[in-house]
Image (tube, rainbow, N blue to C red):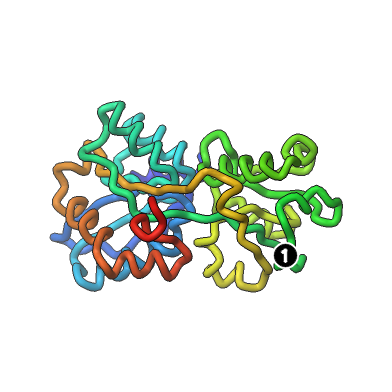
Amino acid sequence: MRMLFRCLMALGVLIAPLPARAGDGRHITIAAAADLRFAMDAIVASYRQEHPRDAIDVVYGSSGKLLTQIEQGAPFELFFSADSGYPKQLVADGQAGGQPVPYALGGLVLWSASIDMRKVQVGDLLQPRFGRIAIANPQHAPYGKRAEQALRAAGIWDRLQPRLVYGENIAQTAQFAQSGNAGVGIVAQSLMLDPVMAGGSYVEVPAAAYEPLRQSFVLTRRGAGNPLARDFARYMQGAHARGILLRYGFHLPDAAGG
């Protein structure tokens, strides 16, 4: 397991702090999109208050890379993706232990640590004053793909290419903007409750500018026989977990047409 986590870190994924293990408790490891980092940490903490003997580890990363790791045998029992297409692919490839369950609809924002973004539009990013623009890698990160769509919709994608900085996932993209390596980051709205991000300024990207970020989770084939994985999947669909998702800036599928 230690070797696995070292490999995951090398691939740009983020590992949540591991809870204390109880000797006779159950255990699962969750693969989760990086936009879920704060909401999922809160949900796991809430679940463990009710089930203190159970241990849940969470590995965060880009949905596309997590999918690849699962298909290559990574020991995950649940997969939470920022794009419903990836859990569907897991089903199609025979690597899932059930059908995907929609859990949220994500949103994009333009965020800066040093620039007042409240009246900025996507097309304005072409102005030199914004410097480098950080987005998640569109090749494997759903938020990066949607950021590309928004930039294309504004007609500035090609001209902005020399100034783009790519994060391996949406959390790393936010770090680029927060650290000053980029003047602006096109990041997940769900990260805005991070205390580090609270010192900056942001504006929502119009939802019409990109394909909806419908998010789903699925039991993996490994997780299908794990009682804790099935219990946590049910918990994610309950009122308390859904309330936490709302608090962290997500919309719920039934409330957003997802």
Q: Residue at x 64, y 47 (%)?
A: 135
Say above or below: 133 vs 11.
Answer: below
Q: Where the N terminus falls, by quadrant? A: top left
**Residue sticking out furthest to the right:** 128
Q: Dot 1 lies on which element? A: loop
**Residue sticking out furthest to the top:** 93
Q: Which corner quadrant of the image does residue 157 belong to?
A: top right
Q: Residue at x 73, y 65 (%)?
A: 119
Q: For this rendering, which residue is in front, 114 or 204?
A: 204
- On the image, the x and y values in percent for residue 125 come to 77, 51
For label 1, the crowd category at 10 Å Cα-Cα, with few meaning under 14, some 14 to 19 and many 20 or more, is some
221 sits to left or right of 215: left
Q: For this rendering, which residue is in front, 13 or 136?
A: 136
- On the image, the x and y values in percent for residue 113 come to 71, 65
Say above or below: 166 vs 24.
Answer: above
How many numbered circles are shown?
A: 1
- On the image, the x and y values in percent for residue 148 come to 63, 41
Q: Which residue is mark 1?
A: 117
Q: Which corner quadrant of the image does residue 202 belong to?
A: bottom right
218 sits to left or right of 165: left
- On the image, the x and y values in percent for residue 233 come to 23, 54
Q: For this rendering, which residue is in front, 116 or 172?
A: 116
Q: Residue at x 60, y 55 (%)?
A: 206
42 sits to left or right of 203: left
Say above or below: 162 vs 106.
Answer: above
Q: Residue at x 57, y 49 (%)?
A: 208
Q: Look at label 1 and name its amino acid.
A: Met
Q: Which corner quadrant of the image does residue 203 belong to?
A: bottom right
